[in-house]
Image (cartoon, rainbow, N blue to C red):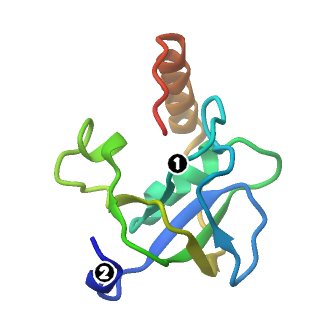
């Protein structure tokens, strides 16, 4: 999807990083997930729920944060989700090789219930034991 084709859809990025309005989130740094390998893409979503998962599951100290972001280049469906788990992209999950600009922050969001968060973390641990890195 090209940046001009995004209409006025709002995009989010969940993380534990402390960012400011105007900051760029760029690929090329260690991922906030898994084995923390160098990230080839930056991930974003058009659903608050998916951003909450990002904020809750990212590695790091401190509270999760959800930023409202603006892509600076083309975005594409996130194949980690759309090809494998949710064909048709109902989670509205995307990725880009171009930076995302922070244009705002979501305050007062509600995390998932503790049992749901634990179930997701347990699932990711099982995948890790199998040698599957769920996020590139």
Residue at figure coordinates x 54%, y 56% from the top left:
52
- Furthest-right residue in view? 61
Give the x, y percent position of residue 110. 59, 61
Quadrant of the drawing holding the N terminus: bottom left
**Residue underneath mark 2:** 6
The residue nearer to you, when weighing 89 against 6, is 6
Give left or right: position of 45 versus 40: left
Q: Is residue 4 above or below residue 125?
A: below
Residue occupying image coordinates x 82% and y 52%:
62
Please tell me whether residue 117 is drawn above or below residue 102 in the rendered image.
above
Disc 1/disc 2 C-alpha distance (Å) = 22 Å
- Please give the name of the residue rendered at 47% of the width and 62% of the height, measured from the top-left corner: 44
Corner quadrant of residue 94 = bottom left
Estimate how packed mark 1 is, as few (under 14), some (14 to 19) or many (20 or more) residues with alpha carbons within 10 Å: some
User: Which circle, 1 or 2, is nearer the viewer?
Assistant: 1
Dot label at residue 40: 1
Task: Tell me which residue sits at (52%, 49%) in the image.
Answer: 53
Residue 22, image quadrant: bottom right
Q: Is residue 107 left or right of residue 91?
A: right
- Where disc 2 sits, the SS reads loop
Crowd band around label 2 with a 10 angstrom C-alpha radius: few (<14), some (14–19), many (20+): few
Give the secondary structure at mark 1. Answer: loop
The numbered mark at residue 12 is none
The correct choice, above or below, for 52 with respect to 24 in the image is: above
């Amino acid at each position: 999807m090209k940046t001009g084709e995004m209409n006025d859809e709002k995009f989010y990025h969940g993380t534990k990083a402390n960012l400011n309005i105007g900051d760029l989130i760029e690929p090329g740094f260690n991922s906030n997930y898994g084995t923390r390998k160098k990230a080839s893409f930056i991930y974003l979503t058009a659903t608050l729920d998916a951003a909450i998962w990002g904020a809750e599951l990212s590695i790091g100290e401190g509270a999760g944060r959800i930023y409202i972001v603006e892509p600076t280049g083309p975005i594409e469906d996130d194949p980690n989700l759309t090809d494998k788990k949710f064909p048709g992209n109902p989670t509205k999950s995307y990725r880009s090789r171009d930076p995302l600009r922070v244009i705002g922050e979501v305050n007062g969001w509600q995390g998932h219930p503790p049992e749901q968060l634990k179930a997701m973390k347990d699932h990711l641990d099982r995948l890790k034991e199998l040698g599957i890195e769920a996020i590139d």
